Image (cartoon, rainbow, N blue to C red):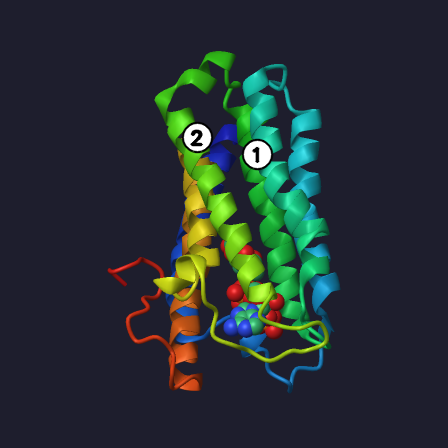
Amino acid sequence: MTTETFFDIFLVFWFVVAGVSFFSLFKTAAPYGRYASSGLTKTIGNKLSWIIMETPAVLVFAASFLLGIHTHTLAALVFLVMWEAHYIHRAFIYPFTLRTKDKRMPFAILMSGFFFNIINGALNGGYLFTISGGYPNEWLKDPRFITGFVLFVIGLIVNRSSDRVLRNLRPPGESGYKIPHGGLYQWISCPNYLGEIIEWTGWAIATWSLPGLAFAVWTAANLIPRAWSHHKWYRQHFSDYPFERNVLLPGIW
Ligand SMILES: NC(=O)c1ccc[n+]([C@@H]2O[C@H](COP(=O)([O-])OP(=O)(O)OC[C@H]3O[C@@H](n4cnc5c(N)ncnc54)[C@H](OP(=O)(O)O)[C@@H]3O)[C@@H](O)[C@H]2O)c1
């Protein structure tokens, strides 16, 4: 079996697993953050968990670039910068901004994030820098790249600014929950998730690749059910939760 055939078969499997995850996460929310159960014994400190979980995304993608065959174009470099702009922040800055006093993450969640990031980084990096045959610099002028890039940047800004609103709800040392206000929270419960979904949809369009699409599908499969759980959770826990606020799509859902 050639590497390309294995790659294609694995991608099909990967899309199927994303679909299964989507439906099962509607049944049971991933048990971290507000859904973490105090009964679990195998847990790791929250900040350290985020660092361990997200570091493979930084390293595997960078290694794919360094070991890749088609990396001598500006287009390849732009993809590297886009990816690392997200993941260096997620792995090495975001965890230190969290105000999650004494919170712990189940080992199983940490491991699933860790292996997801290895596979996802290898699929995207392996495809972009080797299997695809390379992206010429003209690709940077292609409407698909430009549209995807703009979406990626908008998504990144929405994700980061919305995560910042959540962070600022808690004075240092506190761990309770409040109703978020401001920005897109005026209309929806989880704009940080909407931003992340827009970001990786932009990536899928900018790379015009099946691994990019798989990542966007996985992001939606993880975050659409979680946004729905958060929305229900807010409604259950706050009697004054704004009635008109939607889950993820302003005015629609
Ligand atoms: N690409 C993907 O598939 C994927 C998957 C998962 C996450 N992510 C990204 O990772 C980031 C974190 O995800 P997450 O699921 O942990 O997000 P989250 O549930 O919105 O929580 C983010 C942070 O804000 C705190 N927080 C949330 N709501 C709060 C409230 N009402 N009052 C006070 N504090 C509040 C949380 O504390 P607690 O921890 O104490 O709840 C946590 O520290 C997001 O940017 C998300 O887009 C991406």
Q: Secondary structure at mark 1?
A: helix
Lateral position of residue 114 relative to residue 15, left or right: right
Residue drawn at point x = 54 percent, y = 28 percent: 128
Q: Secondary structure at mark 2?
A: helix
Q: Vertical placement of 107 versus 119: above or below?
A: below
Residue sitting nearer the eye, 11 or 134 = 134
Q: Residue at x 47, y 49 (%)?
A: 158
Residue 243 numbered tag: none
Q: Quadrant of ligand 1?
A: bottom right
Query: In which quadrant of the rendered view does residue 50 lie?
Result: bottom right
Does any portion of residue 2 appear in the rendered image?
no
> Looking at the picture, does residue 50 appear above or below residue 69?
below
Looking at the picture, tell me which residue is in the foreground, 169 or 176: 169
- Place of residue 19 in the rendered image (x, y in percent of width and height, measured from the top left): 38, 57
Q: Position of residue 213 (x, y in %)?
A: 41, 40
State whether residue 73 is above or below residue 147.
above
Contact, CB < 8 Å: mark 2 with mark 1?
Answer: yes
Q: Residue 144 placed where, x, y %? A: 37, 26
Question: Foreground residue, 242 or 25?
Answer: 242
The residues bearing labels 2 and 1 have C-alpha atoms spaced at a distance of: 10 Å
Kind of residue indicated by mark 2? Ala
For the residue carrying disc 2, how many other residues have a C-alpha within 10 Å: few (<14), some (14-19), or many (20+)? many
Residue carrying label 2: 206
Residue at mark 1: 82
The quadrant holding residue 12 is: top left
Quarter of the picture holding the C terminus: bottom left
Disc 1 crowd, CA 10 A, few/some/many (<14, 14-19, 20+): some
Amino acid type at circle 1 is: Met
